[in-house]
Amino acid sequence: MLLTSLLRILLTRSFRPFTFKGQYSNQLDFAGMDNLGLYVHIPFCKSICSFCPYCKELFDEELALKYKDALLKEIDLVCKETREKKAVTSLYFGGGTPTLLIDHLSDIIQKLKEYFIINDGIGVEIHPDELTDEILGKLQNADVSMVSIGVQSFDEGCLQKIGRRNIKIKEKLSLLNKYSFSVIDMDLIFGIPGQDKQILKNDIETAFSYGATQISTYPFIDFTFANNEYKPLPHKEKRIMLEYLNELCSQPGINRTSVWTFAKSDTKKYSSVTRDTFLGFGVSATTLLQDIFKINTFSIPEYINRIDSNNLPTALTLNFSKRQRAVYYLFWSAYSLHINEDSFAGLIGKPLTQMYKFELFIAKKLGLLTKKDNMYCLTSKASYIYHYLEQKYTTAYIDKMWNISRKIAFPRKIELK
Ligand code: SF4
């Protein structure tokens, strides 16, 4: 907690915390945003995994259909002032298990296409249970070009420790060969008790051999509100595992594309978080614009009620100071291991070297950053520090925010210090 607070104070040059207030506006100013992305949250699952922190509940068809109608209406409410179609980068569906609404995803995509031109593809998260010819065929027909499969591990013992079953996953992954998705991401978790280097090696090799173009490896984090029977391995062991993952993936044809992702060369990235600005639709979805960050309510009934009254379902809004916005930008740029000076200046309105001259100097001296053209690149030493900090911020910020939001549909205020 002390570390996260100190860094925040240092980088924002202020004691002011990130303060989210229970206020909302029905106008979102996204028309002038470059590199805007879209995200849609589908919060239903067939069963609940003990480790999972995301906003979801057990699938109920009647509720899911009402939710879909509310989603379509939310899109209309957000975009009603749009004069002409706006170009966006990509559209990602996450959850939950988006494919539980497989017969309705194309309606949602079509609704978004009334307002947006999607240039870099449509991505959908898939639970391994849902890998069937019927679902994959329907995704392809709906113009989905990127899939992300929540494998987590191929090891039976590891799966059992995080509350998952093995469901003949290799057989199911083989089906992907028949389709032409340009990006196949597979999520894997490291730091599960009992997991060792051999298991990790097998997980990585199996994922690539079954067609993964990208592997997203996440450290096992024990959220306070998750239901984990087994606790993650200690930090030191997780760091050794990440070093080993990096070593395993340091081979020709594979690039490290972020602190926790590795992708085949010449393939596009599956990345729903590292975008400069984005609009989020559905419960718990976040929207990041020039100077605001907003979060929708986590309650499905309250989400539907708000939409029914023709109001946006925003629960909390953070109005960024310039330095807070800069820090947010830097945090997610650093995750992708590069900080582009021009993009920073374009979004924040001031040169990076002017705002963070001292920090850049120190980081270069400590061997954390190198500079190439207009790009600052994180060294591998910096990537391990980032890995450590990201887990600290997850506990200090995301855990707190999600824990409150799960209990209170419209919190009055949340301060992240
Ligand atoms: S991990 Fe995926 S399937 Fe499991 S509860 Fe979370 S969202 Fe649902």
Image (cartoon, rainbow, N blue to C red):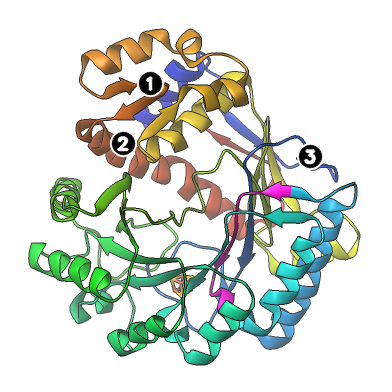
Q: Position of residue 225 (x, y in %)?
A: 45, 60
Q: Tell whether 375 sits left or right of 77.
A: left
Q: Tell whether 195 sits left or right of 329.
A: left
Residue 3 sits above or below residue 225 on the image:
above
Q: Which residue is mark 2?
A: 386
Q: Which residue is mark 1?
A: 373
Q: Residue at x 90, y 46 (%)?
A: 83
Q: Position of residue 147 (x, y in %)?
A: 47, 69
Q: Secondary structure at mark 2?
A: helix
Q: Quadrant of residue 368?
A: top left
| Of pointers 2 and 1, the one earlier in the residue sequence | 1
Q: Disc 3 or disc 1, which is closer to the eye?
A: 1
Please, what is the three-letter code of the amino acid marked with disc 3?
Answer: Ala
Q: How many marks?
A: 3
Residue 358 sits above or below residue 307 on the image:
above
**Mark 2 and mark 1: span between their CA atoms?**
23 Å
How crowded pointer 2 is (Cα within 10 Å; few <14, some 14-19, many 20+) is rated as some
**Mark 3 and mark 2: span between their CA atoms?**
33 Å
Q: Position of residue 110 (x, y in %)?
A: 76, 69
| Of pointers 3 and 1, the one earlier in the residue sequence | 3
Residue 43 sits above or below residue 252 on the image:
below
Q: Which residues are magenta?
A: 87-99
Q: Residue at x 50, y 26 (%)?
A: 327
Residue 58 seen in this snapshot: no
Q: Disc 2 or disc 1, which is closer to the eye?
A: 1
- Is 89 in the magenta? yes
Q: Residue at x 45, y 11 (%)?
A: 353
How crowded pointer 1 is (Cα within 10 Å; few <14, some 14-19, many 20+) is rated as few
State yes or no: Cβ of the residue under disc 3 lies below 8 Å from any atom of ligand 1: no
Please, what is the three-letter code of the amino acid marked with disc 2?
Answer: Tyr
Residue 54 seen in this snapshot: yes
